[in-house]
Image (spheres, grey):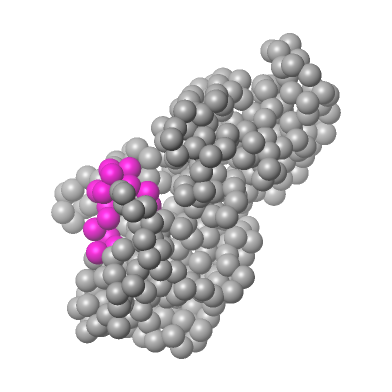
Amino acid sequence: MPYSPAKPTACLALADGTLFFGKGFGATGDTVAELCFNTAMTGYQEIMTDPSYAGQIVTFTFPHIGNTGVNADDDEAADPVAAGMIVKWDPTVPSNWRSTETLADWMQKRGRICMGGVDTRRLTRAIRRQGAPHVALSHRPDGQFDIAALVAKARAFPGLVGLDLAKDVTCAQSYVWDQQRWAWPSGYTRRVEPGFKVVAIDFGAKRNILRCLASAGCDVTVLPASATAEDVLALRPDGVFLSNGPGDPAATGAYAVPMIQGVMKADIPVFGICLGHQMLALALGAKTIKMNHGHHGANHPVKDVETGKVEITSMNHGFTVDSQTLPAGVLETHVSLFDGSNCGIRVADRPIFSVQYHPEASPGPQDSYYLFERFAAAMAARGAVPA
């Protein structure tokens, strides 16, 4: 059935009863999730496959979504993890030499529901005003919607507070990673020279983070989120990396914090990103809190308070470390210039540090890559030798 504004094929129902209608694409059916908005102008495929978006539908504020298609090289995970997407304009026929498939076909094959033709500015204002709402998104080609049922589904969604989603997106078993960052003209290459032995804990790790570790001189072994300190230390690592991931850090921290505390007792370098940053803070005695609408985008200015340097960063988080709860000996190293929220910490006189943002996403484009080099330098300073 052809789409017309008078006969929408998709409906977004907010828990407060607000409705948005548009043209559905991707999979059909219904899904419920938290709704966030992302301000990035590029990287929609990386965003949809970022495991940190589990339990969320993403509204893209930039209107040209889908115009470069999709390709296997840009996936951050095997399949899209975000529950769905909302865009202003319907995706067009892609125009890019790397494209192998249209966004609509890709989303349909992978069971993700999408909606176009939406006033995303109005929707973004609603998210900013009331906080990230709980929503139900429905795509029905016949245009027949049970509005009351959709609103009820949105209201029944439990939300992300108290929800451990890392267990749903982590790897099932350990594996070795040796792929390095993409570079012209070779593309992705494999690491063959000896490196520092790094154990990466997968709370929902993006592939490009692992590539950056490999490119920084690390031989990476990835362990599931449920790994214990004994599991980690049995591999005799030179350093431990705590990955990004979805959900409430306090919920995942119920089992991850004891592991992190056990690793820190071994006095080896520890580096965390995003959820890994939040759980490191919890392990050190700080607290995390839910944000009103979070930070999601590739244009977030962050200040390094120790050097005065400002980095343009990529962010994706709905929880944040409460800097007022940082204990003595834990220093705040980075802050958001948007709202002053915490974006980095380090332990005084110990090689333990983390950041809230995503240095591997390269929005600067390489403003924050030094963090991977700092991690490698910390291992070298402790006497580790690539082997």
Q: Main secondary structure of the magenta part?
A: loop
Q: Quadrant of the C terminus?
A: bottom left
Q: Position of residue 28 (x, y in %)?
A: 75, 35
Residue 91 is at least partly visible in this image = yes
Task: Decide if residue 350 is on the left or right side of residue 35.
Answer: left
Q: Position of residue 246 (x, y in %)?
A: 55, 55
Task: Decide if residue 317 is on the left or right side of residue 327.
Answer: right
Nearer to me, 113 or 292: 113
Residue 258 is at least partly visible in this image = no
Q: Quadrant of the N terminus?
A: top right
Instruction: Residue at 49% x, 86% y: name it.
Output: 230
Instruction: Residue at 55% x, 72% y: name it.
Output: 224
Nearer to me, 369 or 14: 369
- Which residues lie in the magenta part? 356-373
| 359 inside magenta stretch | yes
Task: Decide if residue 260 is on the left or right side of residue 248.
Answer: left
| 310 inside magenta stretch | no
Instruction: Residue at 30% x, 48% y: name it.
Output: 184
Q: Quadrant of residue 219?
A: bottom left
Farthest residue to the left: give it.
307
Q: Position of residue 53 (x, y in %)?
A: 55, 48
**From what the image shows, is residue 62 above or below residue 29?**
above
Nearer to me, 162 or 22: 22
Instruction: Residue at 82% x, 34% y: name it.
Output: 149
Q: Quadrant of residue 221?
A: bottom left
Q: Position of residue 35 (x, y in %)?
A: 59, 38
